[in-house]
Amino acid sequence: MKQRMVSGIQPSGNLHIGNYLGAIRQWVDLQEEYDLFLFVADLHAITTPQDPDDLRRRTIEIAKLYLAAGIDPAKTTIFVQSQVPEHAQLGWVLNTIARMGDLEKMTQFKNKTESQGERAGVGLFDYPVLMAGDILMYDAEKVPVGDDQVQHVELTRTLARRFNKRFGSLRRGDSEASELFIVPQPLTKKEGARIMALDNPARKMSKSASSEYNYIALMDTPEQARKKIMKAVTDSGSEIVYSDEKPALKNLINIYALLGNTMTEEVAAQFAGKGYAEFKQSLADVVCDFLVDFQTKYNSFSDETVLDILSAGAKRAQPIAQAKLAEVYRIVGLR
């Protein structure tokens, strides 16, 4: 039996090459090794205001992006989070053992609400608990995440241990005794885990950024992508070196190496003695070639095909979710 892995992306904002390099491409390889459950996180998306029609459209788009990247529905269970309502039900049970102090530590909430103050919604504060339910529902041993989400996986581990300690152990089958929730491990990728913003290398590339020059969207035209790269922030000096002392250039070299399937050292050596302009032109060529190929695959999937895949995925996921929720309800006394 393969170990199980769970992950998902919200259908909000514009998915960009940082999402692809930091998460989606990693999943393509991991689906060969793990029993991967990959969902479109629409319940998480509504923690901030969404236009209903845009949300429905983007839900299909996210699934198409998964498929275009190489996620295989024959190997990976792809579904929409809200179509398996047990996610929300388990999230509520976990809320009863989560503590305010657990959630007040979450830096993602602080970062996302620094300009909202008291207008920030309770769902945005609480969504790490729902994320814990997403993971624990499927007995996931590993959770592939970027560096900024490791804290949420740590909360999941805390809630799993707290639940197991409070409600004791559960006997499954005739002889196997085990606790109800597996305590999962975060799985991070060193390179590409944090692709930084083109306009500010101190901040992560963000699909909700106010400036389009922050990111290169997966659905940008080659002309749009080239313009963004040529306008990308660079460091002082002109030497092409891969160094922490030049964070903007280091980020661009990471993008070049990852999309060009080469090593960062080789990229730096290739442009030794050359200037930023020549490097950016070559980087733009690499990015544009990637986008053309990716978008060709994306456009090969019809909405009808995607909806059929999502429906089949939900039918595969729901019996597992129903069985887990039934165990949880029985243990806490709800049935």
Image (cartoon, rainbow, N blue to C red):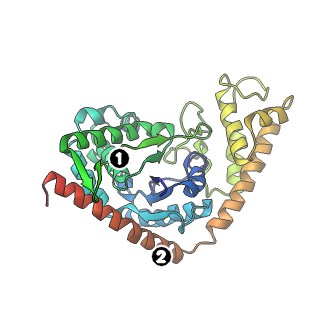
Say what amino acid the circle numbered 2 marks: Asp
Residue at image position (23%, 39%) is: 165
Q: Is residue 47 visible?
A: no
Residue labelled with disc 2:
308
- Position of 241 relative to 218 (above/below): above
Residue at image position (41%, 56%) is: 41
Residue at image position (31%, 37%) is: 158
- Position of 201 relative to 287 (above/below): above
Q: Position of residue 222 (x, y in %)?
A: 71, 55
CA separation in Å, label 1 and label 2: 31 Å
Say what amino acid the circle numbered 1 marks: Ile
Residue labelled with disc 1:
182
Please give left or right for residue 137 compared with residue 19 in the image: left
Q: Position of residue 149 (x, y in %)?
A: 44, 40
Q: Nearer the viewer, residue 299 or 281?
A: 299
Indicate the quadrant containing the C terminus: top left, top right, bottom left or bottom right: bottom left
Neighbour tally class for label 2: few under 14, some 14-19, many 20 plus, Cα within 10 Å: few
Q: Nearer the viewer, residue 161 or 135?
A: 161
Neighbour tally class for label 1: few under 14, some 14-19, many 20 plus, Cα within 10 Å: some
